[in-house]
Amino acid sequence: MNFNSLKLRLLVAAGLAISVLLLIAGFSFFYIFQRYVERVAISQLDDQYIQLVNRVRIDDSGKLFVQGKLSDPRFSKPYGGLYWQINESNLPPVRSLSLFDEIIAAPKDSQQIDGNIIHLIGGPNGSRLFSLEKQLVLPIGGGVDRKLSILMAVDRISIDETVGKFGGEILRGLGYLWALLLATTAAVILLGLRPLEALRRDVGAIRLGGSKQISGHYPSEVEGLVSELNGLLFDKHEQLERTRLRVSNLAHGLKTPLTIISSIGDSVERAGLKSEAREIHDGVTDMNGLVERELARARMATGHAVQLSKVQPVVLRVVGALDKTSGDHMVHWQVDVPAEAQVQVESGDLLELTGILLDNASKWAKTQVNVFWRDGGLTVEDDGPGVPDDKLAVIQKRGVRLDESVPGSGLGLGIARDIVDIYGYRLVFARSKLGGLSVRFEKA
């Protein structure tokens, strides 16, 4: 998983934000529903309180009792879940049959809900009761009143079970909502980042040589970046062209002074100063090699704005040119390169590279040079004397020549190596099946 991905970062951030918000919403819904259930319970207890008050009686002895039964049968069933108890100072409480032999302890802590006094107290068999407390004054005549405290209670577990079931449904619903919101957010993120993907493709097209500027319509948020990139590409191209022109001019400008110095060396040699003449000629040779090297580099592309170039036309063009300039040294060329063969190298650099490899093979070949394309690579082999295995690495060095009998500066393979390095390719040297040297140009 790529943690540097902008898509992943946005998705994780959105997932966390959605999770936090839904958790807050879930707790809020749970709390609101709990209060709603409690209010419903209070309303039901209040209705039952009215029934109870209407049935409170005092007998001739002054004893308090409740006439008849309340409508809910749970009041008559031992530990039925609904309870009432009437408390009066210094007198035993009057209780519902559902309390059996239990007495509800006098409540200490209380809370108010909508003006009603609510207690959470212990009940029969270790249960917890949600109770409503009401005060009642009964006038009995003679200016004497009896003050009663009436508790109407319901088992708390019935409220908790109702709230718990709702909480489970809420949790399931919020889970579905979380998945839906996350999927929707992911789709929005992908849609919002599509212009960046289009920009990446356009920049890739420039790198492959298919375009020189970023084109197309982009959102205003990306348009500024596109303009800056186009400006940067233009400035880089202009700077590259100016640099190549300056290097080319400098290298060509050095050729005339070097020719003059070389002629002076000839004059020095004719004057009998052979050692001094040799030093002059060696220096001129080194300088000429450097000039050729810089000219080749000036012609070379950067390797970043790369196009796909067809290999077959370039090979045939080089072979045709070498045939015309071979003189008495006739070479038979066997070319097996399919028309669809392509490499990711600028066409001018591919021509330079192919020219070096084929020219080197034709110089050393006796009669035969094979050029063929296999497995995405171009191989050039000759039937010349070849190179000893321990010298294969040496011939890649700039200016190194194993045989001075063949004309050349020894710079060709060094230039070829620079070209393949720029484009991420490599040259593989081996002994060919023809007995000479085999050079394979392939992706590194």
Image (tube, rainbow, N blue to C red):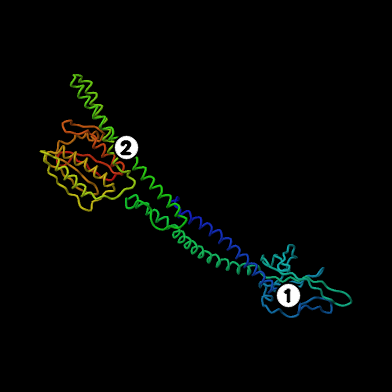
Q: Position of residue 163 (x, y in %)?
A: 61, 67
Q: Position of residue 186 (x, y in %)?
A: 46, 60
N-term mark: 2 or 1: 1
Q: Which mark is residue 71?
A: none
The type of residue carrying mark 2 is Val
Q: CA distance from mark 2 to mark 1?
A: 105 Å
* 322 vs 13, nearest the viewer: 322
Question: Callout 2: 10 Å neighbours few (<14), some, many (20+)?
Answer: some
257 up-or-down from 333: above or below: above
Q: Is residue 416 left or right of residue 86?
A: left
The type of residue carrying mark 1 is Tyr
Q: Position of residue 111 (x, y in %)?
A: 72, 64
Residue where numbered disc 2 is placed: 247
* 91 vs 371, nearest the viewer: 371
Q: Is residue 87 left or right of residue 297?
A: right
In the structure shown, which secondary structural element does the residue marked by tag 1 occupy?
Answer: helix
Question: Callout 1: 10 Å neighbours few (<14), some, many (20+)?
Answer: many
Q: Residue at x 84, y 76 (%)?
A: 139
439 up-or-down from 116: above or below: above
* 339 vs 233, nearest the viewer: 233
Residue where numbered disc 1 is placed: 49
